[in-house]
Structure formats: structure tokens, C-alpha cells
Image (cartoon, helix red, strand yellow):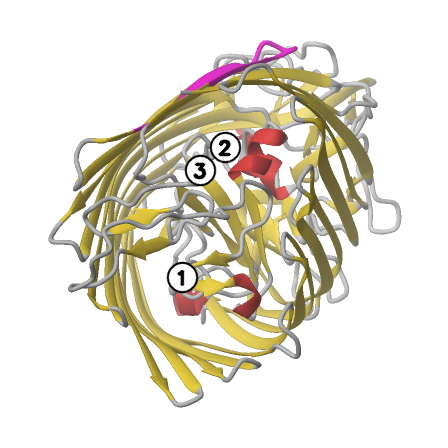
Amino acid sequence: MRNLGIGTALGFGLLTVPAMAQDQFLPGPGSTSQTIIVTGVRDGYQIDATSTATRTPTELNDVPQAVSIITETQIDDQAMRSIADVLRYVPGAVISQGEGHRDQIILRGNSSTADFFVDGLRDDVQYYRGLYNAERIEVLKGPNAMIFGRGGGGGVINRVTKRPVANAFITGSGSADTYGAWYVDADISQPLSESVSTRMNAVYEEFRNNRDFYDGRRVAINPTVALSLGGATRIDLGFEYNSDKRTIDRGVPSAVQGSLTSPSRPLTGVRDTFFGVPGFNVSDFEAKVLNGRVEHRFSDNLTLTSRILYGDYDKLYRNAFAVTPVTPRGGVRSVGLEAYSDPTTRTNLLNQNDLVWTVTTGPVRHVLLAGFEVSDQRTRNQRINGFFGGGDIVNGGRRVFVGLADPITVPPVTLRTAANTGYRSVRTNADVTAFYVQDQISIGDHVDVIGGVRRDRFTLNVDDLVAAQSYSRTDTLWSPRVGVVLKPVQPVSIYASYSRSFLPQSGDQFSSLDITSAALEPERFDNYELGLKWDILPTLNLTAAIYQLDRTNTRAADPNDAARTVLTGAQRSKGFELGLSGAITAQWQISAGYALQDATIRKTTSVAPAGREVPLVPKQQASLWTRYDLTPRLGAGVGVYHQSKSFTSISNTAILPAFTRVDAAAFFKLTPQIEAQINVENLLNSDYFSSAYNDNNIMPGAPTTVRATVRMRL
């Protein structure tokens, strides 16, 4: 939704400006001023500052790191509905299929299911994140352990959510597409007094697409309240309920068995065919999350912020899916399927505390950060394998081969927890205690230096309830970060930086610790980066970065058994990223990006010889989205996305083909309060494959899809 652009501060001392997400304190004691009038708030595709990259309010041009931000305005203009939609317009970011039940990203050649954050707090549960309450999506690239802790080797995704503001409004939208998917949402802001303001975001969404048997629905609500305590303190409290139930669709298999010299391609002619079992393939996710934030200003130069989050997550997913390429069986073209169920519960209790002190001595200005973080994450997970009751079965019924057809016919599936069925049942407890310090030094107007270090003590206890064995590992690690920013002229900054991150060998979701991995050192990520940030116009920003990211003690999914994780030694990612965002004129918005990247295995292991390419890392990506308002009441938009071919797994025996997709949109301002738009995805009806998880879980892109949306603001 468009923000109003002009606000009056809450009398209790703090104003949140939606387009900037920066909190501004009212003048201190003794001041006669009681309000702040905010002008010049951009309502477009460019953001000038963020607190996420450094934990302090910092201009993006002063951050020695590549950061891409997709604003709410751009999300609305492109009718984005998922994190996957957002990341297509972020250079260096690639979407994994995520087994059809979760967000999974590849940033700078590093895949993760857990490097997600919400308002700077860890959000590592496996699910599809909605955008209904997002003010913007921030993509911070390169290792980020100094700020975020473990993981984040290729970067992290942070959702900045909508907080209570000073003005009252009601916004809502409704939307539907040509396959029957639709949603309605609402954003209601209501100050209750000079010291209390509330806001509520909610959505109901039905899922449909071209794929056979695919459906689902999401219900989410996020009420928040902001309170004043004495003029220098703000307390934010929020609760989110999220229920998401949908069909799990893992795409199509490879057409034939591939090899290193002759890689296979996805099976074609089955763009709508579902390689699963209707009613069995389902993901059912429920989250109840409480969060709080306290900000207190001791003086104009000293601020304390404390954040806390408690989350209770319950997820069940079951699926039958292709595990082989198309294979002749008795003269019939067939594909092998397996099935399993994976119930998971998790509780997260997270707390962060930041003290920020600004001090100036002559021409030198310091912004000092000191903080600590504690977290407790408890997980209960099972894997219950499926057995097929007839047909062309192998492996004791664990795998069945079915003939190609539309639809395919799959024998009944029975889930078994008995011994020797591959049943897994684990209970894990991950505890983290960390402290960190950072200094941002500005020397005059032309030189900034940032340096910081974090110490994490990560303890993981895993109880294997099937084998009646327990494993434990504690890692104490230091994560440094250093960067230099030179500003030869006011609109240009040039930076160099080094950062490090780590990931314990228990993996993203803590489910794979055993007697072997408990003895292994954590994965390590070292990033070296040079970059340029240039405000070509006050409203238009150009960014460029070159980097080398080395990863050691590397893990990957076994291409022969996706349930296993294997060590792949070491890998190196190198690349160049270019981004352009903002407004060329008041009527013309643009978001463009280009990435040239190379990610390869550098150390030979039993499953990944040196020289193999890291999966799902296209050599080149390019994106362009632009909107032009032809008149105050009529606008048009066009988007182009291209990525070159990549391999679908570390086996390098199957290819995700290169593709280009063209999108378009038209915008209509019907009244001062009502806007309508039509978005067309895949305008040219290209037959392409959008993502993959492994060699036989490859997702076909949707045919031409038209979505109509109406928005209202009161």
C-alpha cells in the first residue's frame, strides 16, 4: 500500500515512517517542540537507510556490503505473492524448489532453508513466508555472522514488518487470477491516544495454479500495539497467527538418466502432470508467534533496544515424489516414486539486546554497538517412510515404478514406524549465547571504517529416540567483520570488506548430528568484497560489487539419497553483481539487476570431485522491472527475467535449462481512494522450468497467468 508521506508523531516520543522503517525520537527534555513533520518520504523502489546491516541506523551508501531491498511499493506493483517472487529481482539470488513445502534460497552459491529473519530475529522454521505484513524485504549478501550469528554464509533474507504509526487509515485489497487463486487482505492503523497506537494486518488466500490437483489456503493475522512510557521509551508488542495448508508439488523428473558428459534435461510435455498422490501430498503448517521490542533513549547519543520473540510452530508434510529419471520397465516408460511423512514441532525463544552510543571527538565520529543475544530452540522431528501396496515395487516396497500417464496411477501408500524401515525420530535442543561489539568510525566527510567481532557459544544436544543414543557438541566461534568506505564525492561511495560466518555440522535444521558429524568442525565462510554505491540522481541508486566467497568443511545433499547429507570438501564462489533501483523521474520507477557468478567444488571428496559446479548457480542472471505513469490515472509496467542454465544437483548430470520470462502490468487510478491493476506473468507463454531441488524434482514454470487486483485506502 502507498504510505501517506506526511505524519504527525505520537506524543510518547517515537515515530515510525513506513517507507524508511527508521524510528525517530522526539526532541529531548526541555524542548518546546511536540511534533515532527516528516516530508520527502519516498513512495517508490528506493530505500536510503536501514538498521539491519549494522544494527544501527545507517545510510545504505555507508554499509560496506551488497544490500538489495524490495519495497512494498514494488511488491504491490509486481503483484508478488512469495519470497520466490521477490528474489527473482535480486542479483545473485536463486530460488530452490524447497521440496515443494518451504522457502529455500541460494545466495552467492550457498543454499539454505534457515537464513531467514523477521525484524532482525531468526525465523528459521521451514515454511512459505507471506508478504501481507511486510514493509520491505532486505537481502544482505555475504557472511553475516557478526550481526546474525550462525549460518548466513551466502547472505540472509530479512523481512521488515509493519509497525504502528501515528496516523489512522484503513487499506485493503482483493485479487484473483485466471487459475482461480485469490486473496483478500487488510491493513488497519488506529491511534488510541497520544501514547497508544495499534495496527492490524490480515490475509486470507486460496492457492491454485496450472498444476493438476494443486490447491491450498493461508490464513494469517498480525495485530500490533505501540505504547509510550514517559516520552523517551517505546514498547512494541505483536502477535502473529499463521495457518498454511497446501498441496506439496515437487515437479517433474529428468527425461533420461544423465551423465557428466551428457547431462539430462527435465521431462517435457508434462507441464501440468502431478507426480504425487492427491490428498497424500500435503503440507499443514501452523505458527503462533509473540514478539516484543523495547527502545529507550537515555540521551540523544545513547539508546538501548531489546527484542524478544517466542514462537510455537507445528508442521506436518507428507509427499510421494519422483526419485528416478524416466526409466524403461518392461517396455513401459516409467518413473520411480518414494514417499514419506515428516512431522515437526519447534519452539523458539530469542532475545537480543543492543546498546548504541554515538560520540564525536573533533573530526572523528564513533557509533559504538555492544550487545548480547541468547536463544533456546527445541525441536521434535520424525521421518516416517512410506511403503507401496503393490505394483512394480523394489526395496521392499519403499519404491514403486509407475508408467507415464496423465494422471499417473500410484498404488496405496502405508506409513510405517517399525524397526528397519528407515524411521527417524529425534529431539534436539539448540542453545546460543553470544556477545558482540562494533565500531563505526567516520573520519571527516570522506572516510568510514567499520569493525566488529562476535563470539558465539552454540550447544546442540540431539537425542536419537530410535537408536536410544544421544549426541552433543559445543562450538565456540569468533566472527569478525571489517570494512572501509571511501566517499570521494558526496553521491559516490567505494568500499572494501571482509567478513566470516560459520555453520555447525548439524545443518540448517539441527536434525543430522550423529557420532561422525559431532566430531566435525563447523563449516566456515570467508567473504572478500569490493563495491561501489552511487546516487546517480537523488532518487536513483546504482550498486556494483565483486566478491570471492570461500566455503570450507562444506555439506551438500547426497545426489543419490536426498535424505543424506555428505561432506563435499570446499567450494569457492566468485562473482559480479550490479543493481539499479529508484526513480528516473517522478513518473518512472525502475528496478534492474545483473549477476555474473561462478561456484565450483575445489576439494575432491567421494561424491564431489574438484571442478564440479555448485548446483542451481546460473552463470548469468538479469532482471528488469519498470513502471511508467503515462498520466496521473494510468500507468504501465513491464518486466524481463533471464537466467542461464545450471545443474540441478552436485552430481552435475541434469540441467535446469536457461529461460527468459516477460511480465507486464497496467495500473488504473479509479478514484483518489481506489486503484486497480492487471498483471500478466509469462506474457509470451514461454515453456520453461523455474526451479529445482535435485535431478528429479524440477518445477515447470506456469503458462501465461493474468491477475487482477483492486486496492482501497480510507
Work out which residue is located at the far left of the displayed protein and give it: 230
In the rendered image, residue 445, in percent from the top left (x then y), is placed at 54, 80
Marking on residue 330: none
The range drawn in magenta is 173-189
- Relative side of 530 to 216, left or right: right
Frontmost of labels 1 and 2 is 2
Q: Nearer the viewer, residue 150 or 137?
A: 137
Marking on residue 148: 1
- Relative side of 631 to 202, left or right: right
In this orientation, does residue 215 appear? Answer: no
Q: Quadrant of the C terminus?
A: top left
Query: Label 3 sits on what residue type?
Result: Ala
Residue located 88% across and 45% down the image: 262
Number of numbered discs on residues: 3
The CA span between labels 3 and 1 is 20 Å
| Snapshot quadrant of residue 560 | top right
Frontmost of labels 3 and 2 is 2
Query: Label 2 sits on what residue type?
Result: Arg
Q: Tell me the element at label 1.
A: helix
Q: Which residue is mark 2?
A: 2
Q: Tell me the element at label 2.
A: loop
Could you tell me what secondary structure mostly forms the magenta stretch? strand
Residue located 16% across and 47% down the image: 228
Mark 3 Cα within 10 Å, few/some/many (few <14, many 20+)?
Answer: many
Q: Indicate yes or no whether the magenta region holds residue 188.
A: yes
Against 634, residue 366 (above or below) is below
Frontmost of labels 3 and 1 is 3
The CA span between labels 1 and 2 is 30 Å
